[in-house]
Image (cartoon, grey):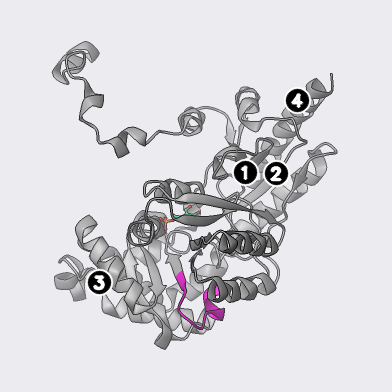
Amino acid sequence: MEERLMRKLGSGSLEFERYFSKKALGMKASEIRELLKLVESSNVISLAGGLPASETFPVEQIKEITKEVLEEHADKALQYGTTKGFTPLRLALARWMEKRYGIPTSKVEIMMVAGSQQALDLAGRVFINRGDIVVVEGPTYLAALQAFKYYDPEFLSIPMDHKGMRIDLLEEKLKKLKAQGKKVKFVYTVSTFQNPMGVTMSVDRRKRLVELADEYDFLIIEDSPYTELRYSGEPVPPVKHFDDTGRVIYLGTFSKILAPGFRLGWIAAQPQFIRKMEIAKQSIDLCANTLAQLIAWKYVEDGYLDEHIPEIVEFYKPRRDAMLKALEDFMPEGVGWTKPDGGMFIWVTLPEGIDTKMMLEKAVAKGVAYVPGEAFFAHRDVKNTMRLNFTYVPEEKIREGVKRLAEVIEAEMKSLGD
Ligand SMILES: Cc1ncc(COP(=O)(O)O)c(C=O)c1O
């Protein structure tokens, strides 16, 4: 069967590689993803994923709303829509952002996209010329690096601490670049409950970042999928809230507050930026999924979203707490980790000399998986970190997973000392 299929596909006679564009040849599947695929089907406790828990999907509300949408608005819900998106949803989101984040609706226009991942690609398309300097956090969201990389920027990675991007170090770099006659095109930040570290940029740094953007003339792309998943501490206004000149392009998404399967996100920015992204989007998919947009419209407009957010928070908080407690209970001296107030991830730092990528196979053999930190750095130059997810597996498994991981780390530290 296998052989027949291979023959049918012409394997052996076609040199597939010959047909790919240079860009496509440059695209590489991550070897870690390949390894983690195996993990999903075994008895390993995976703290590696980035998925929300399916128990948080508001299935009953979605059923109810879908029925209503199809009964009352089937003509719109099943038809092509405009590229910018379904206007009542865009207006509902603008009002929601004004109420929730203090971003005046008069200052932004909203375009619906196929998840914020599409917004990252659109940002690459409309802003990056080959060689442009793009500032990212070190570490940053892996798939943003992949999205931007396609447009050949030069990445400048700015270290992070528990208050987010080190804006003082960014300023130093900006000064140096200015002296060389160079400029940054944009700064990409996952400002709140960052992926992968879980940390939140402080208000002072947010304000300073916006000031620097004005002073050194760059844009800011603020990617904010986790803002509503807050389990402790006080809410922090988005960077966009402090933006008087329209330099901040804000990305939101329904993935973590409704369900990622909707593939629905939005961009809130100056109309001039939206217009260009709209043109870029036309040739990709014409418009975002209209049925999903109409369901999301009712979900926001009729108050389901505001009702559901506390339920998600209540579901995840014990999982965050369980992971922090397990880390405290089991990790050996010399291991550090972030203590996020929200989001989905905790970032663990091991003593220098340990390579978490090399260690992954041993961990999987002991029944636990994580994502090695290296891939989250634009220049892959940090080896001793890892990302743990606490939203997907239940508390008991989190505890057992961290215990197993601590044992693997302890053994690795010992062998390093020998
Ligand atoms: C920082 C960040 N940006 C964007 C995305 C993509 O989200 P979406 O499902 O909206 O495409 C994710 C998903 O995990 C993320 O962590």
Who comes first in sequence, dot 2 or dot 4?
2
The amino acid beneath tag 1 is Arg
Q: Residues within 10 Å of mark 4 (few under 14, many from 20)?
A: some
Who comes first in sequence, dot 4 or dot 3?
3
Q: Are marks 2 and 1 in contact (CB under 8 Å)?
A: yes
Q: CA distance from mark 2 to mark 1?
A: 6 Å
Who comes first in sequence, dot 4 or dot 1?
1
Q: Which residues are magenta?
A: 234-249
Residue 81 left/right relative to 102 = left
Helix, strand, or loop for circle 1? Answer: strand
**Disc 3 versus disc 2: nearer the observer:** 2
Q: CA distance from mark 2 to mark 4?
A: 15 Å
Q: CA distance from mark 4 to mark 3?
A: 56 Å
Helix, strand, or loop for circle 4? Answer: helix
Q: CA distance from mark 3 to mark 1?
A: 40 Å
Q: Residues within 10 Å of mark 3 (few under 14, many from 20)?
A: many
Q: Find disc 4 in the rendering and name its residue.
A: 412
Q: Main secondary structure of the magenta part?
A: loop
Q: Residues within 10 Å of mark 1 (few under 14, many from 20)?
A: many
Q: CA distance from mark 3 to mark 2?
A: 45 Å
Q: Is residue 356 above or below residue 221?
A: above
On residue 387, the disc is 1
Quadrant of the drawing holding the C terminus: top right
Helix, strand, or loop for circle 2? Answer: strand
Who comes first in sequence, dot 3 or dot 2?
3
Q: Compare residues 182 and 17 and report the one nearer the observer.
A: 182
Quadrant of the drawing holding the N terminus: top left
Name the spot of residue 181 as percent of width and height, x first: 52, 62
Residue 403 in sight here? yes
Number of marks present in the image shown? 4
Q: Find disc 2 in the rendering and name its residue.
A: 348
Q: Find disc 3 in the rendering and name its residue.
A: 69
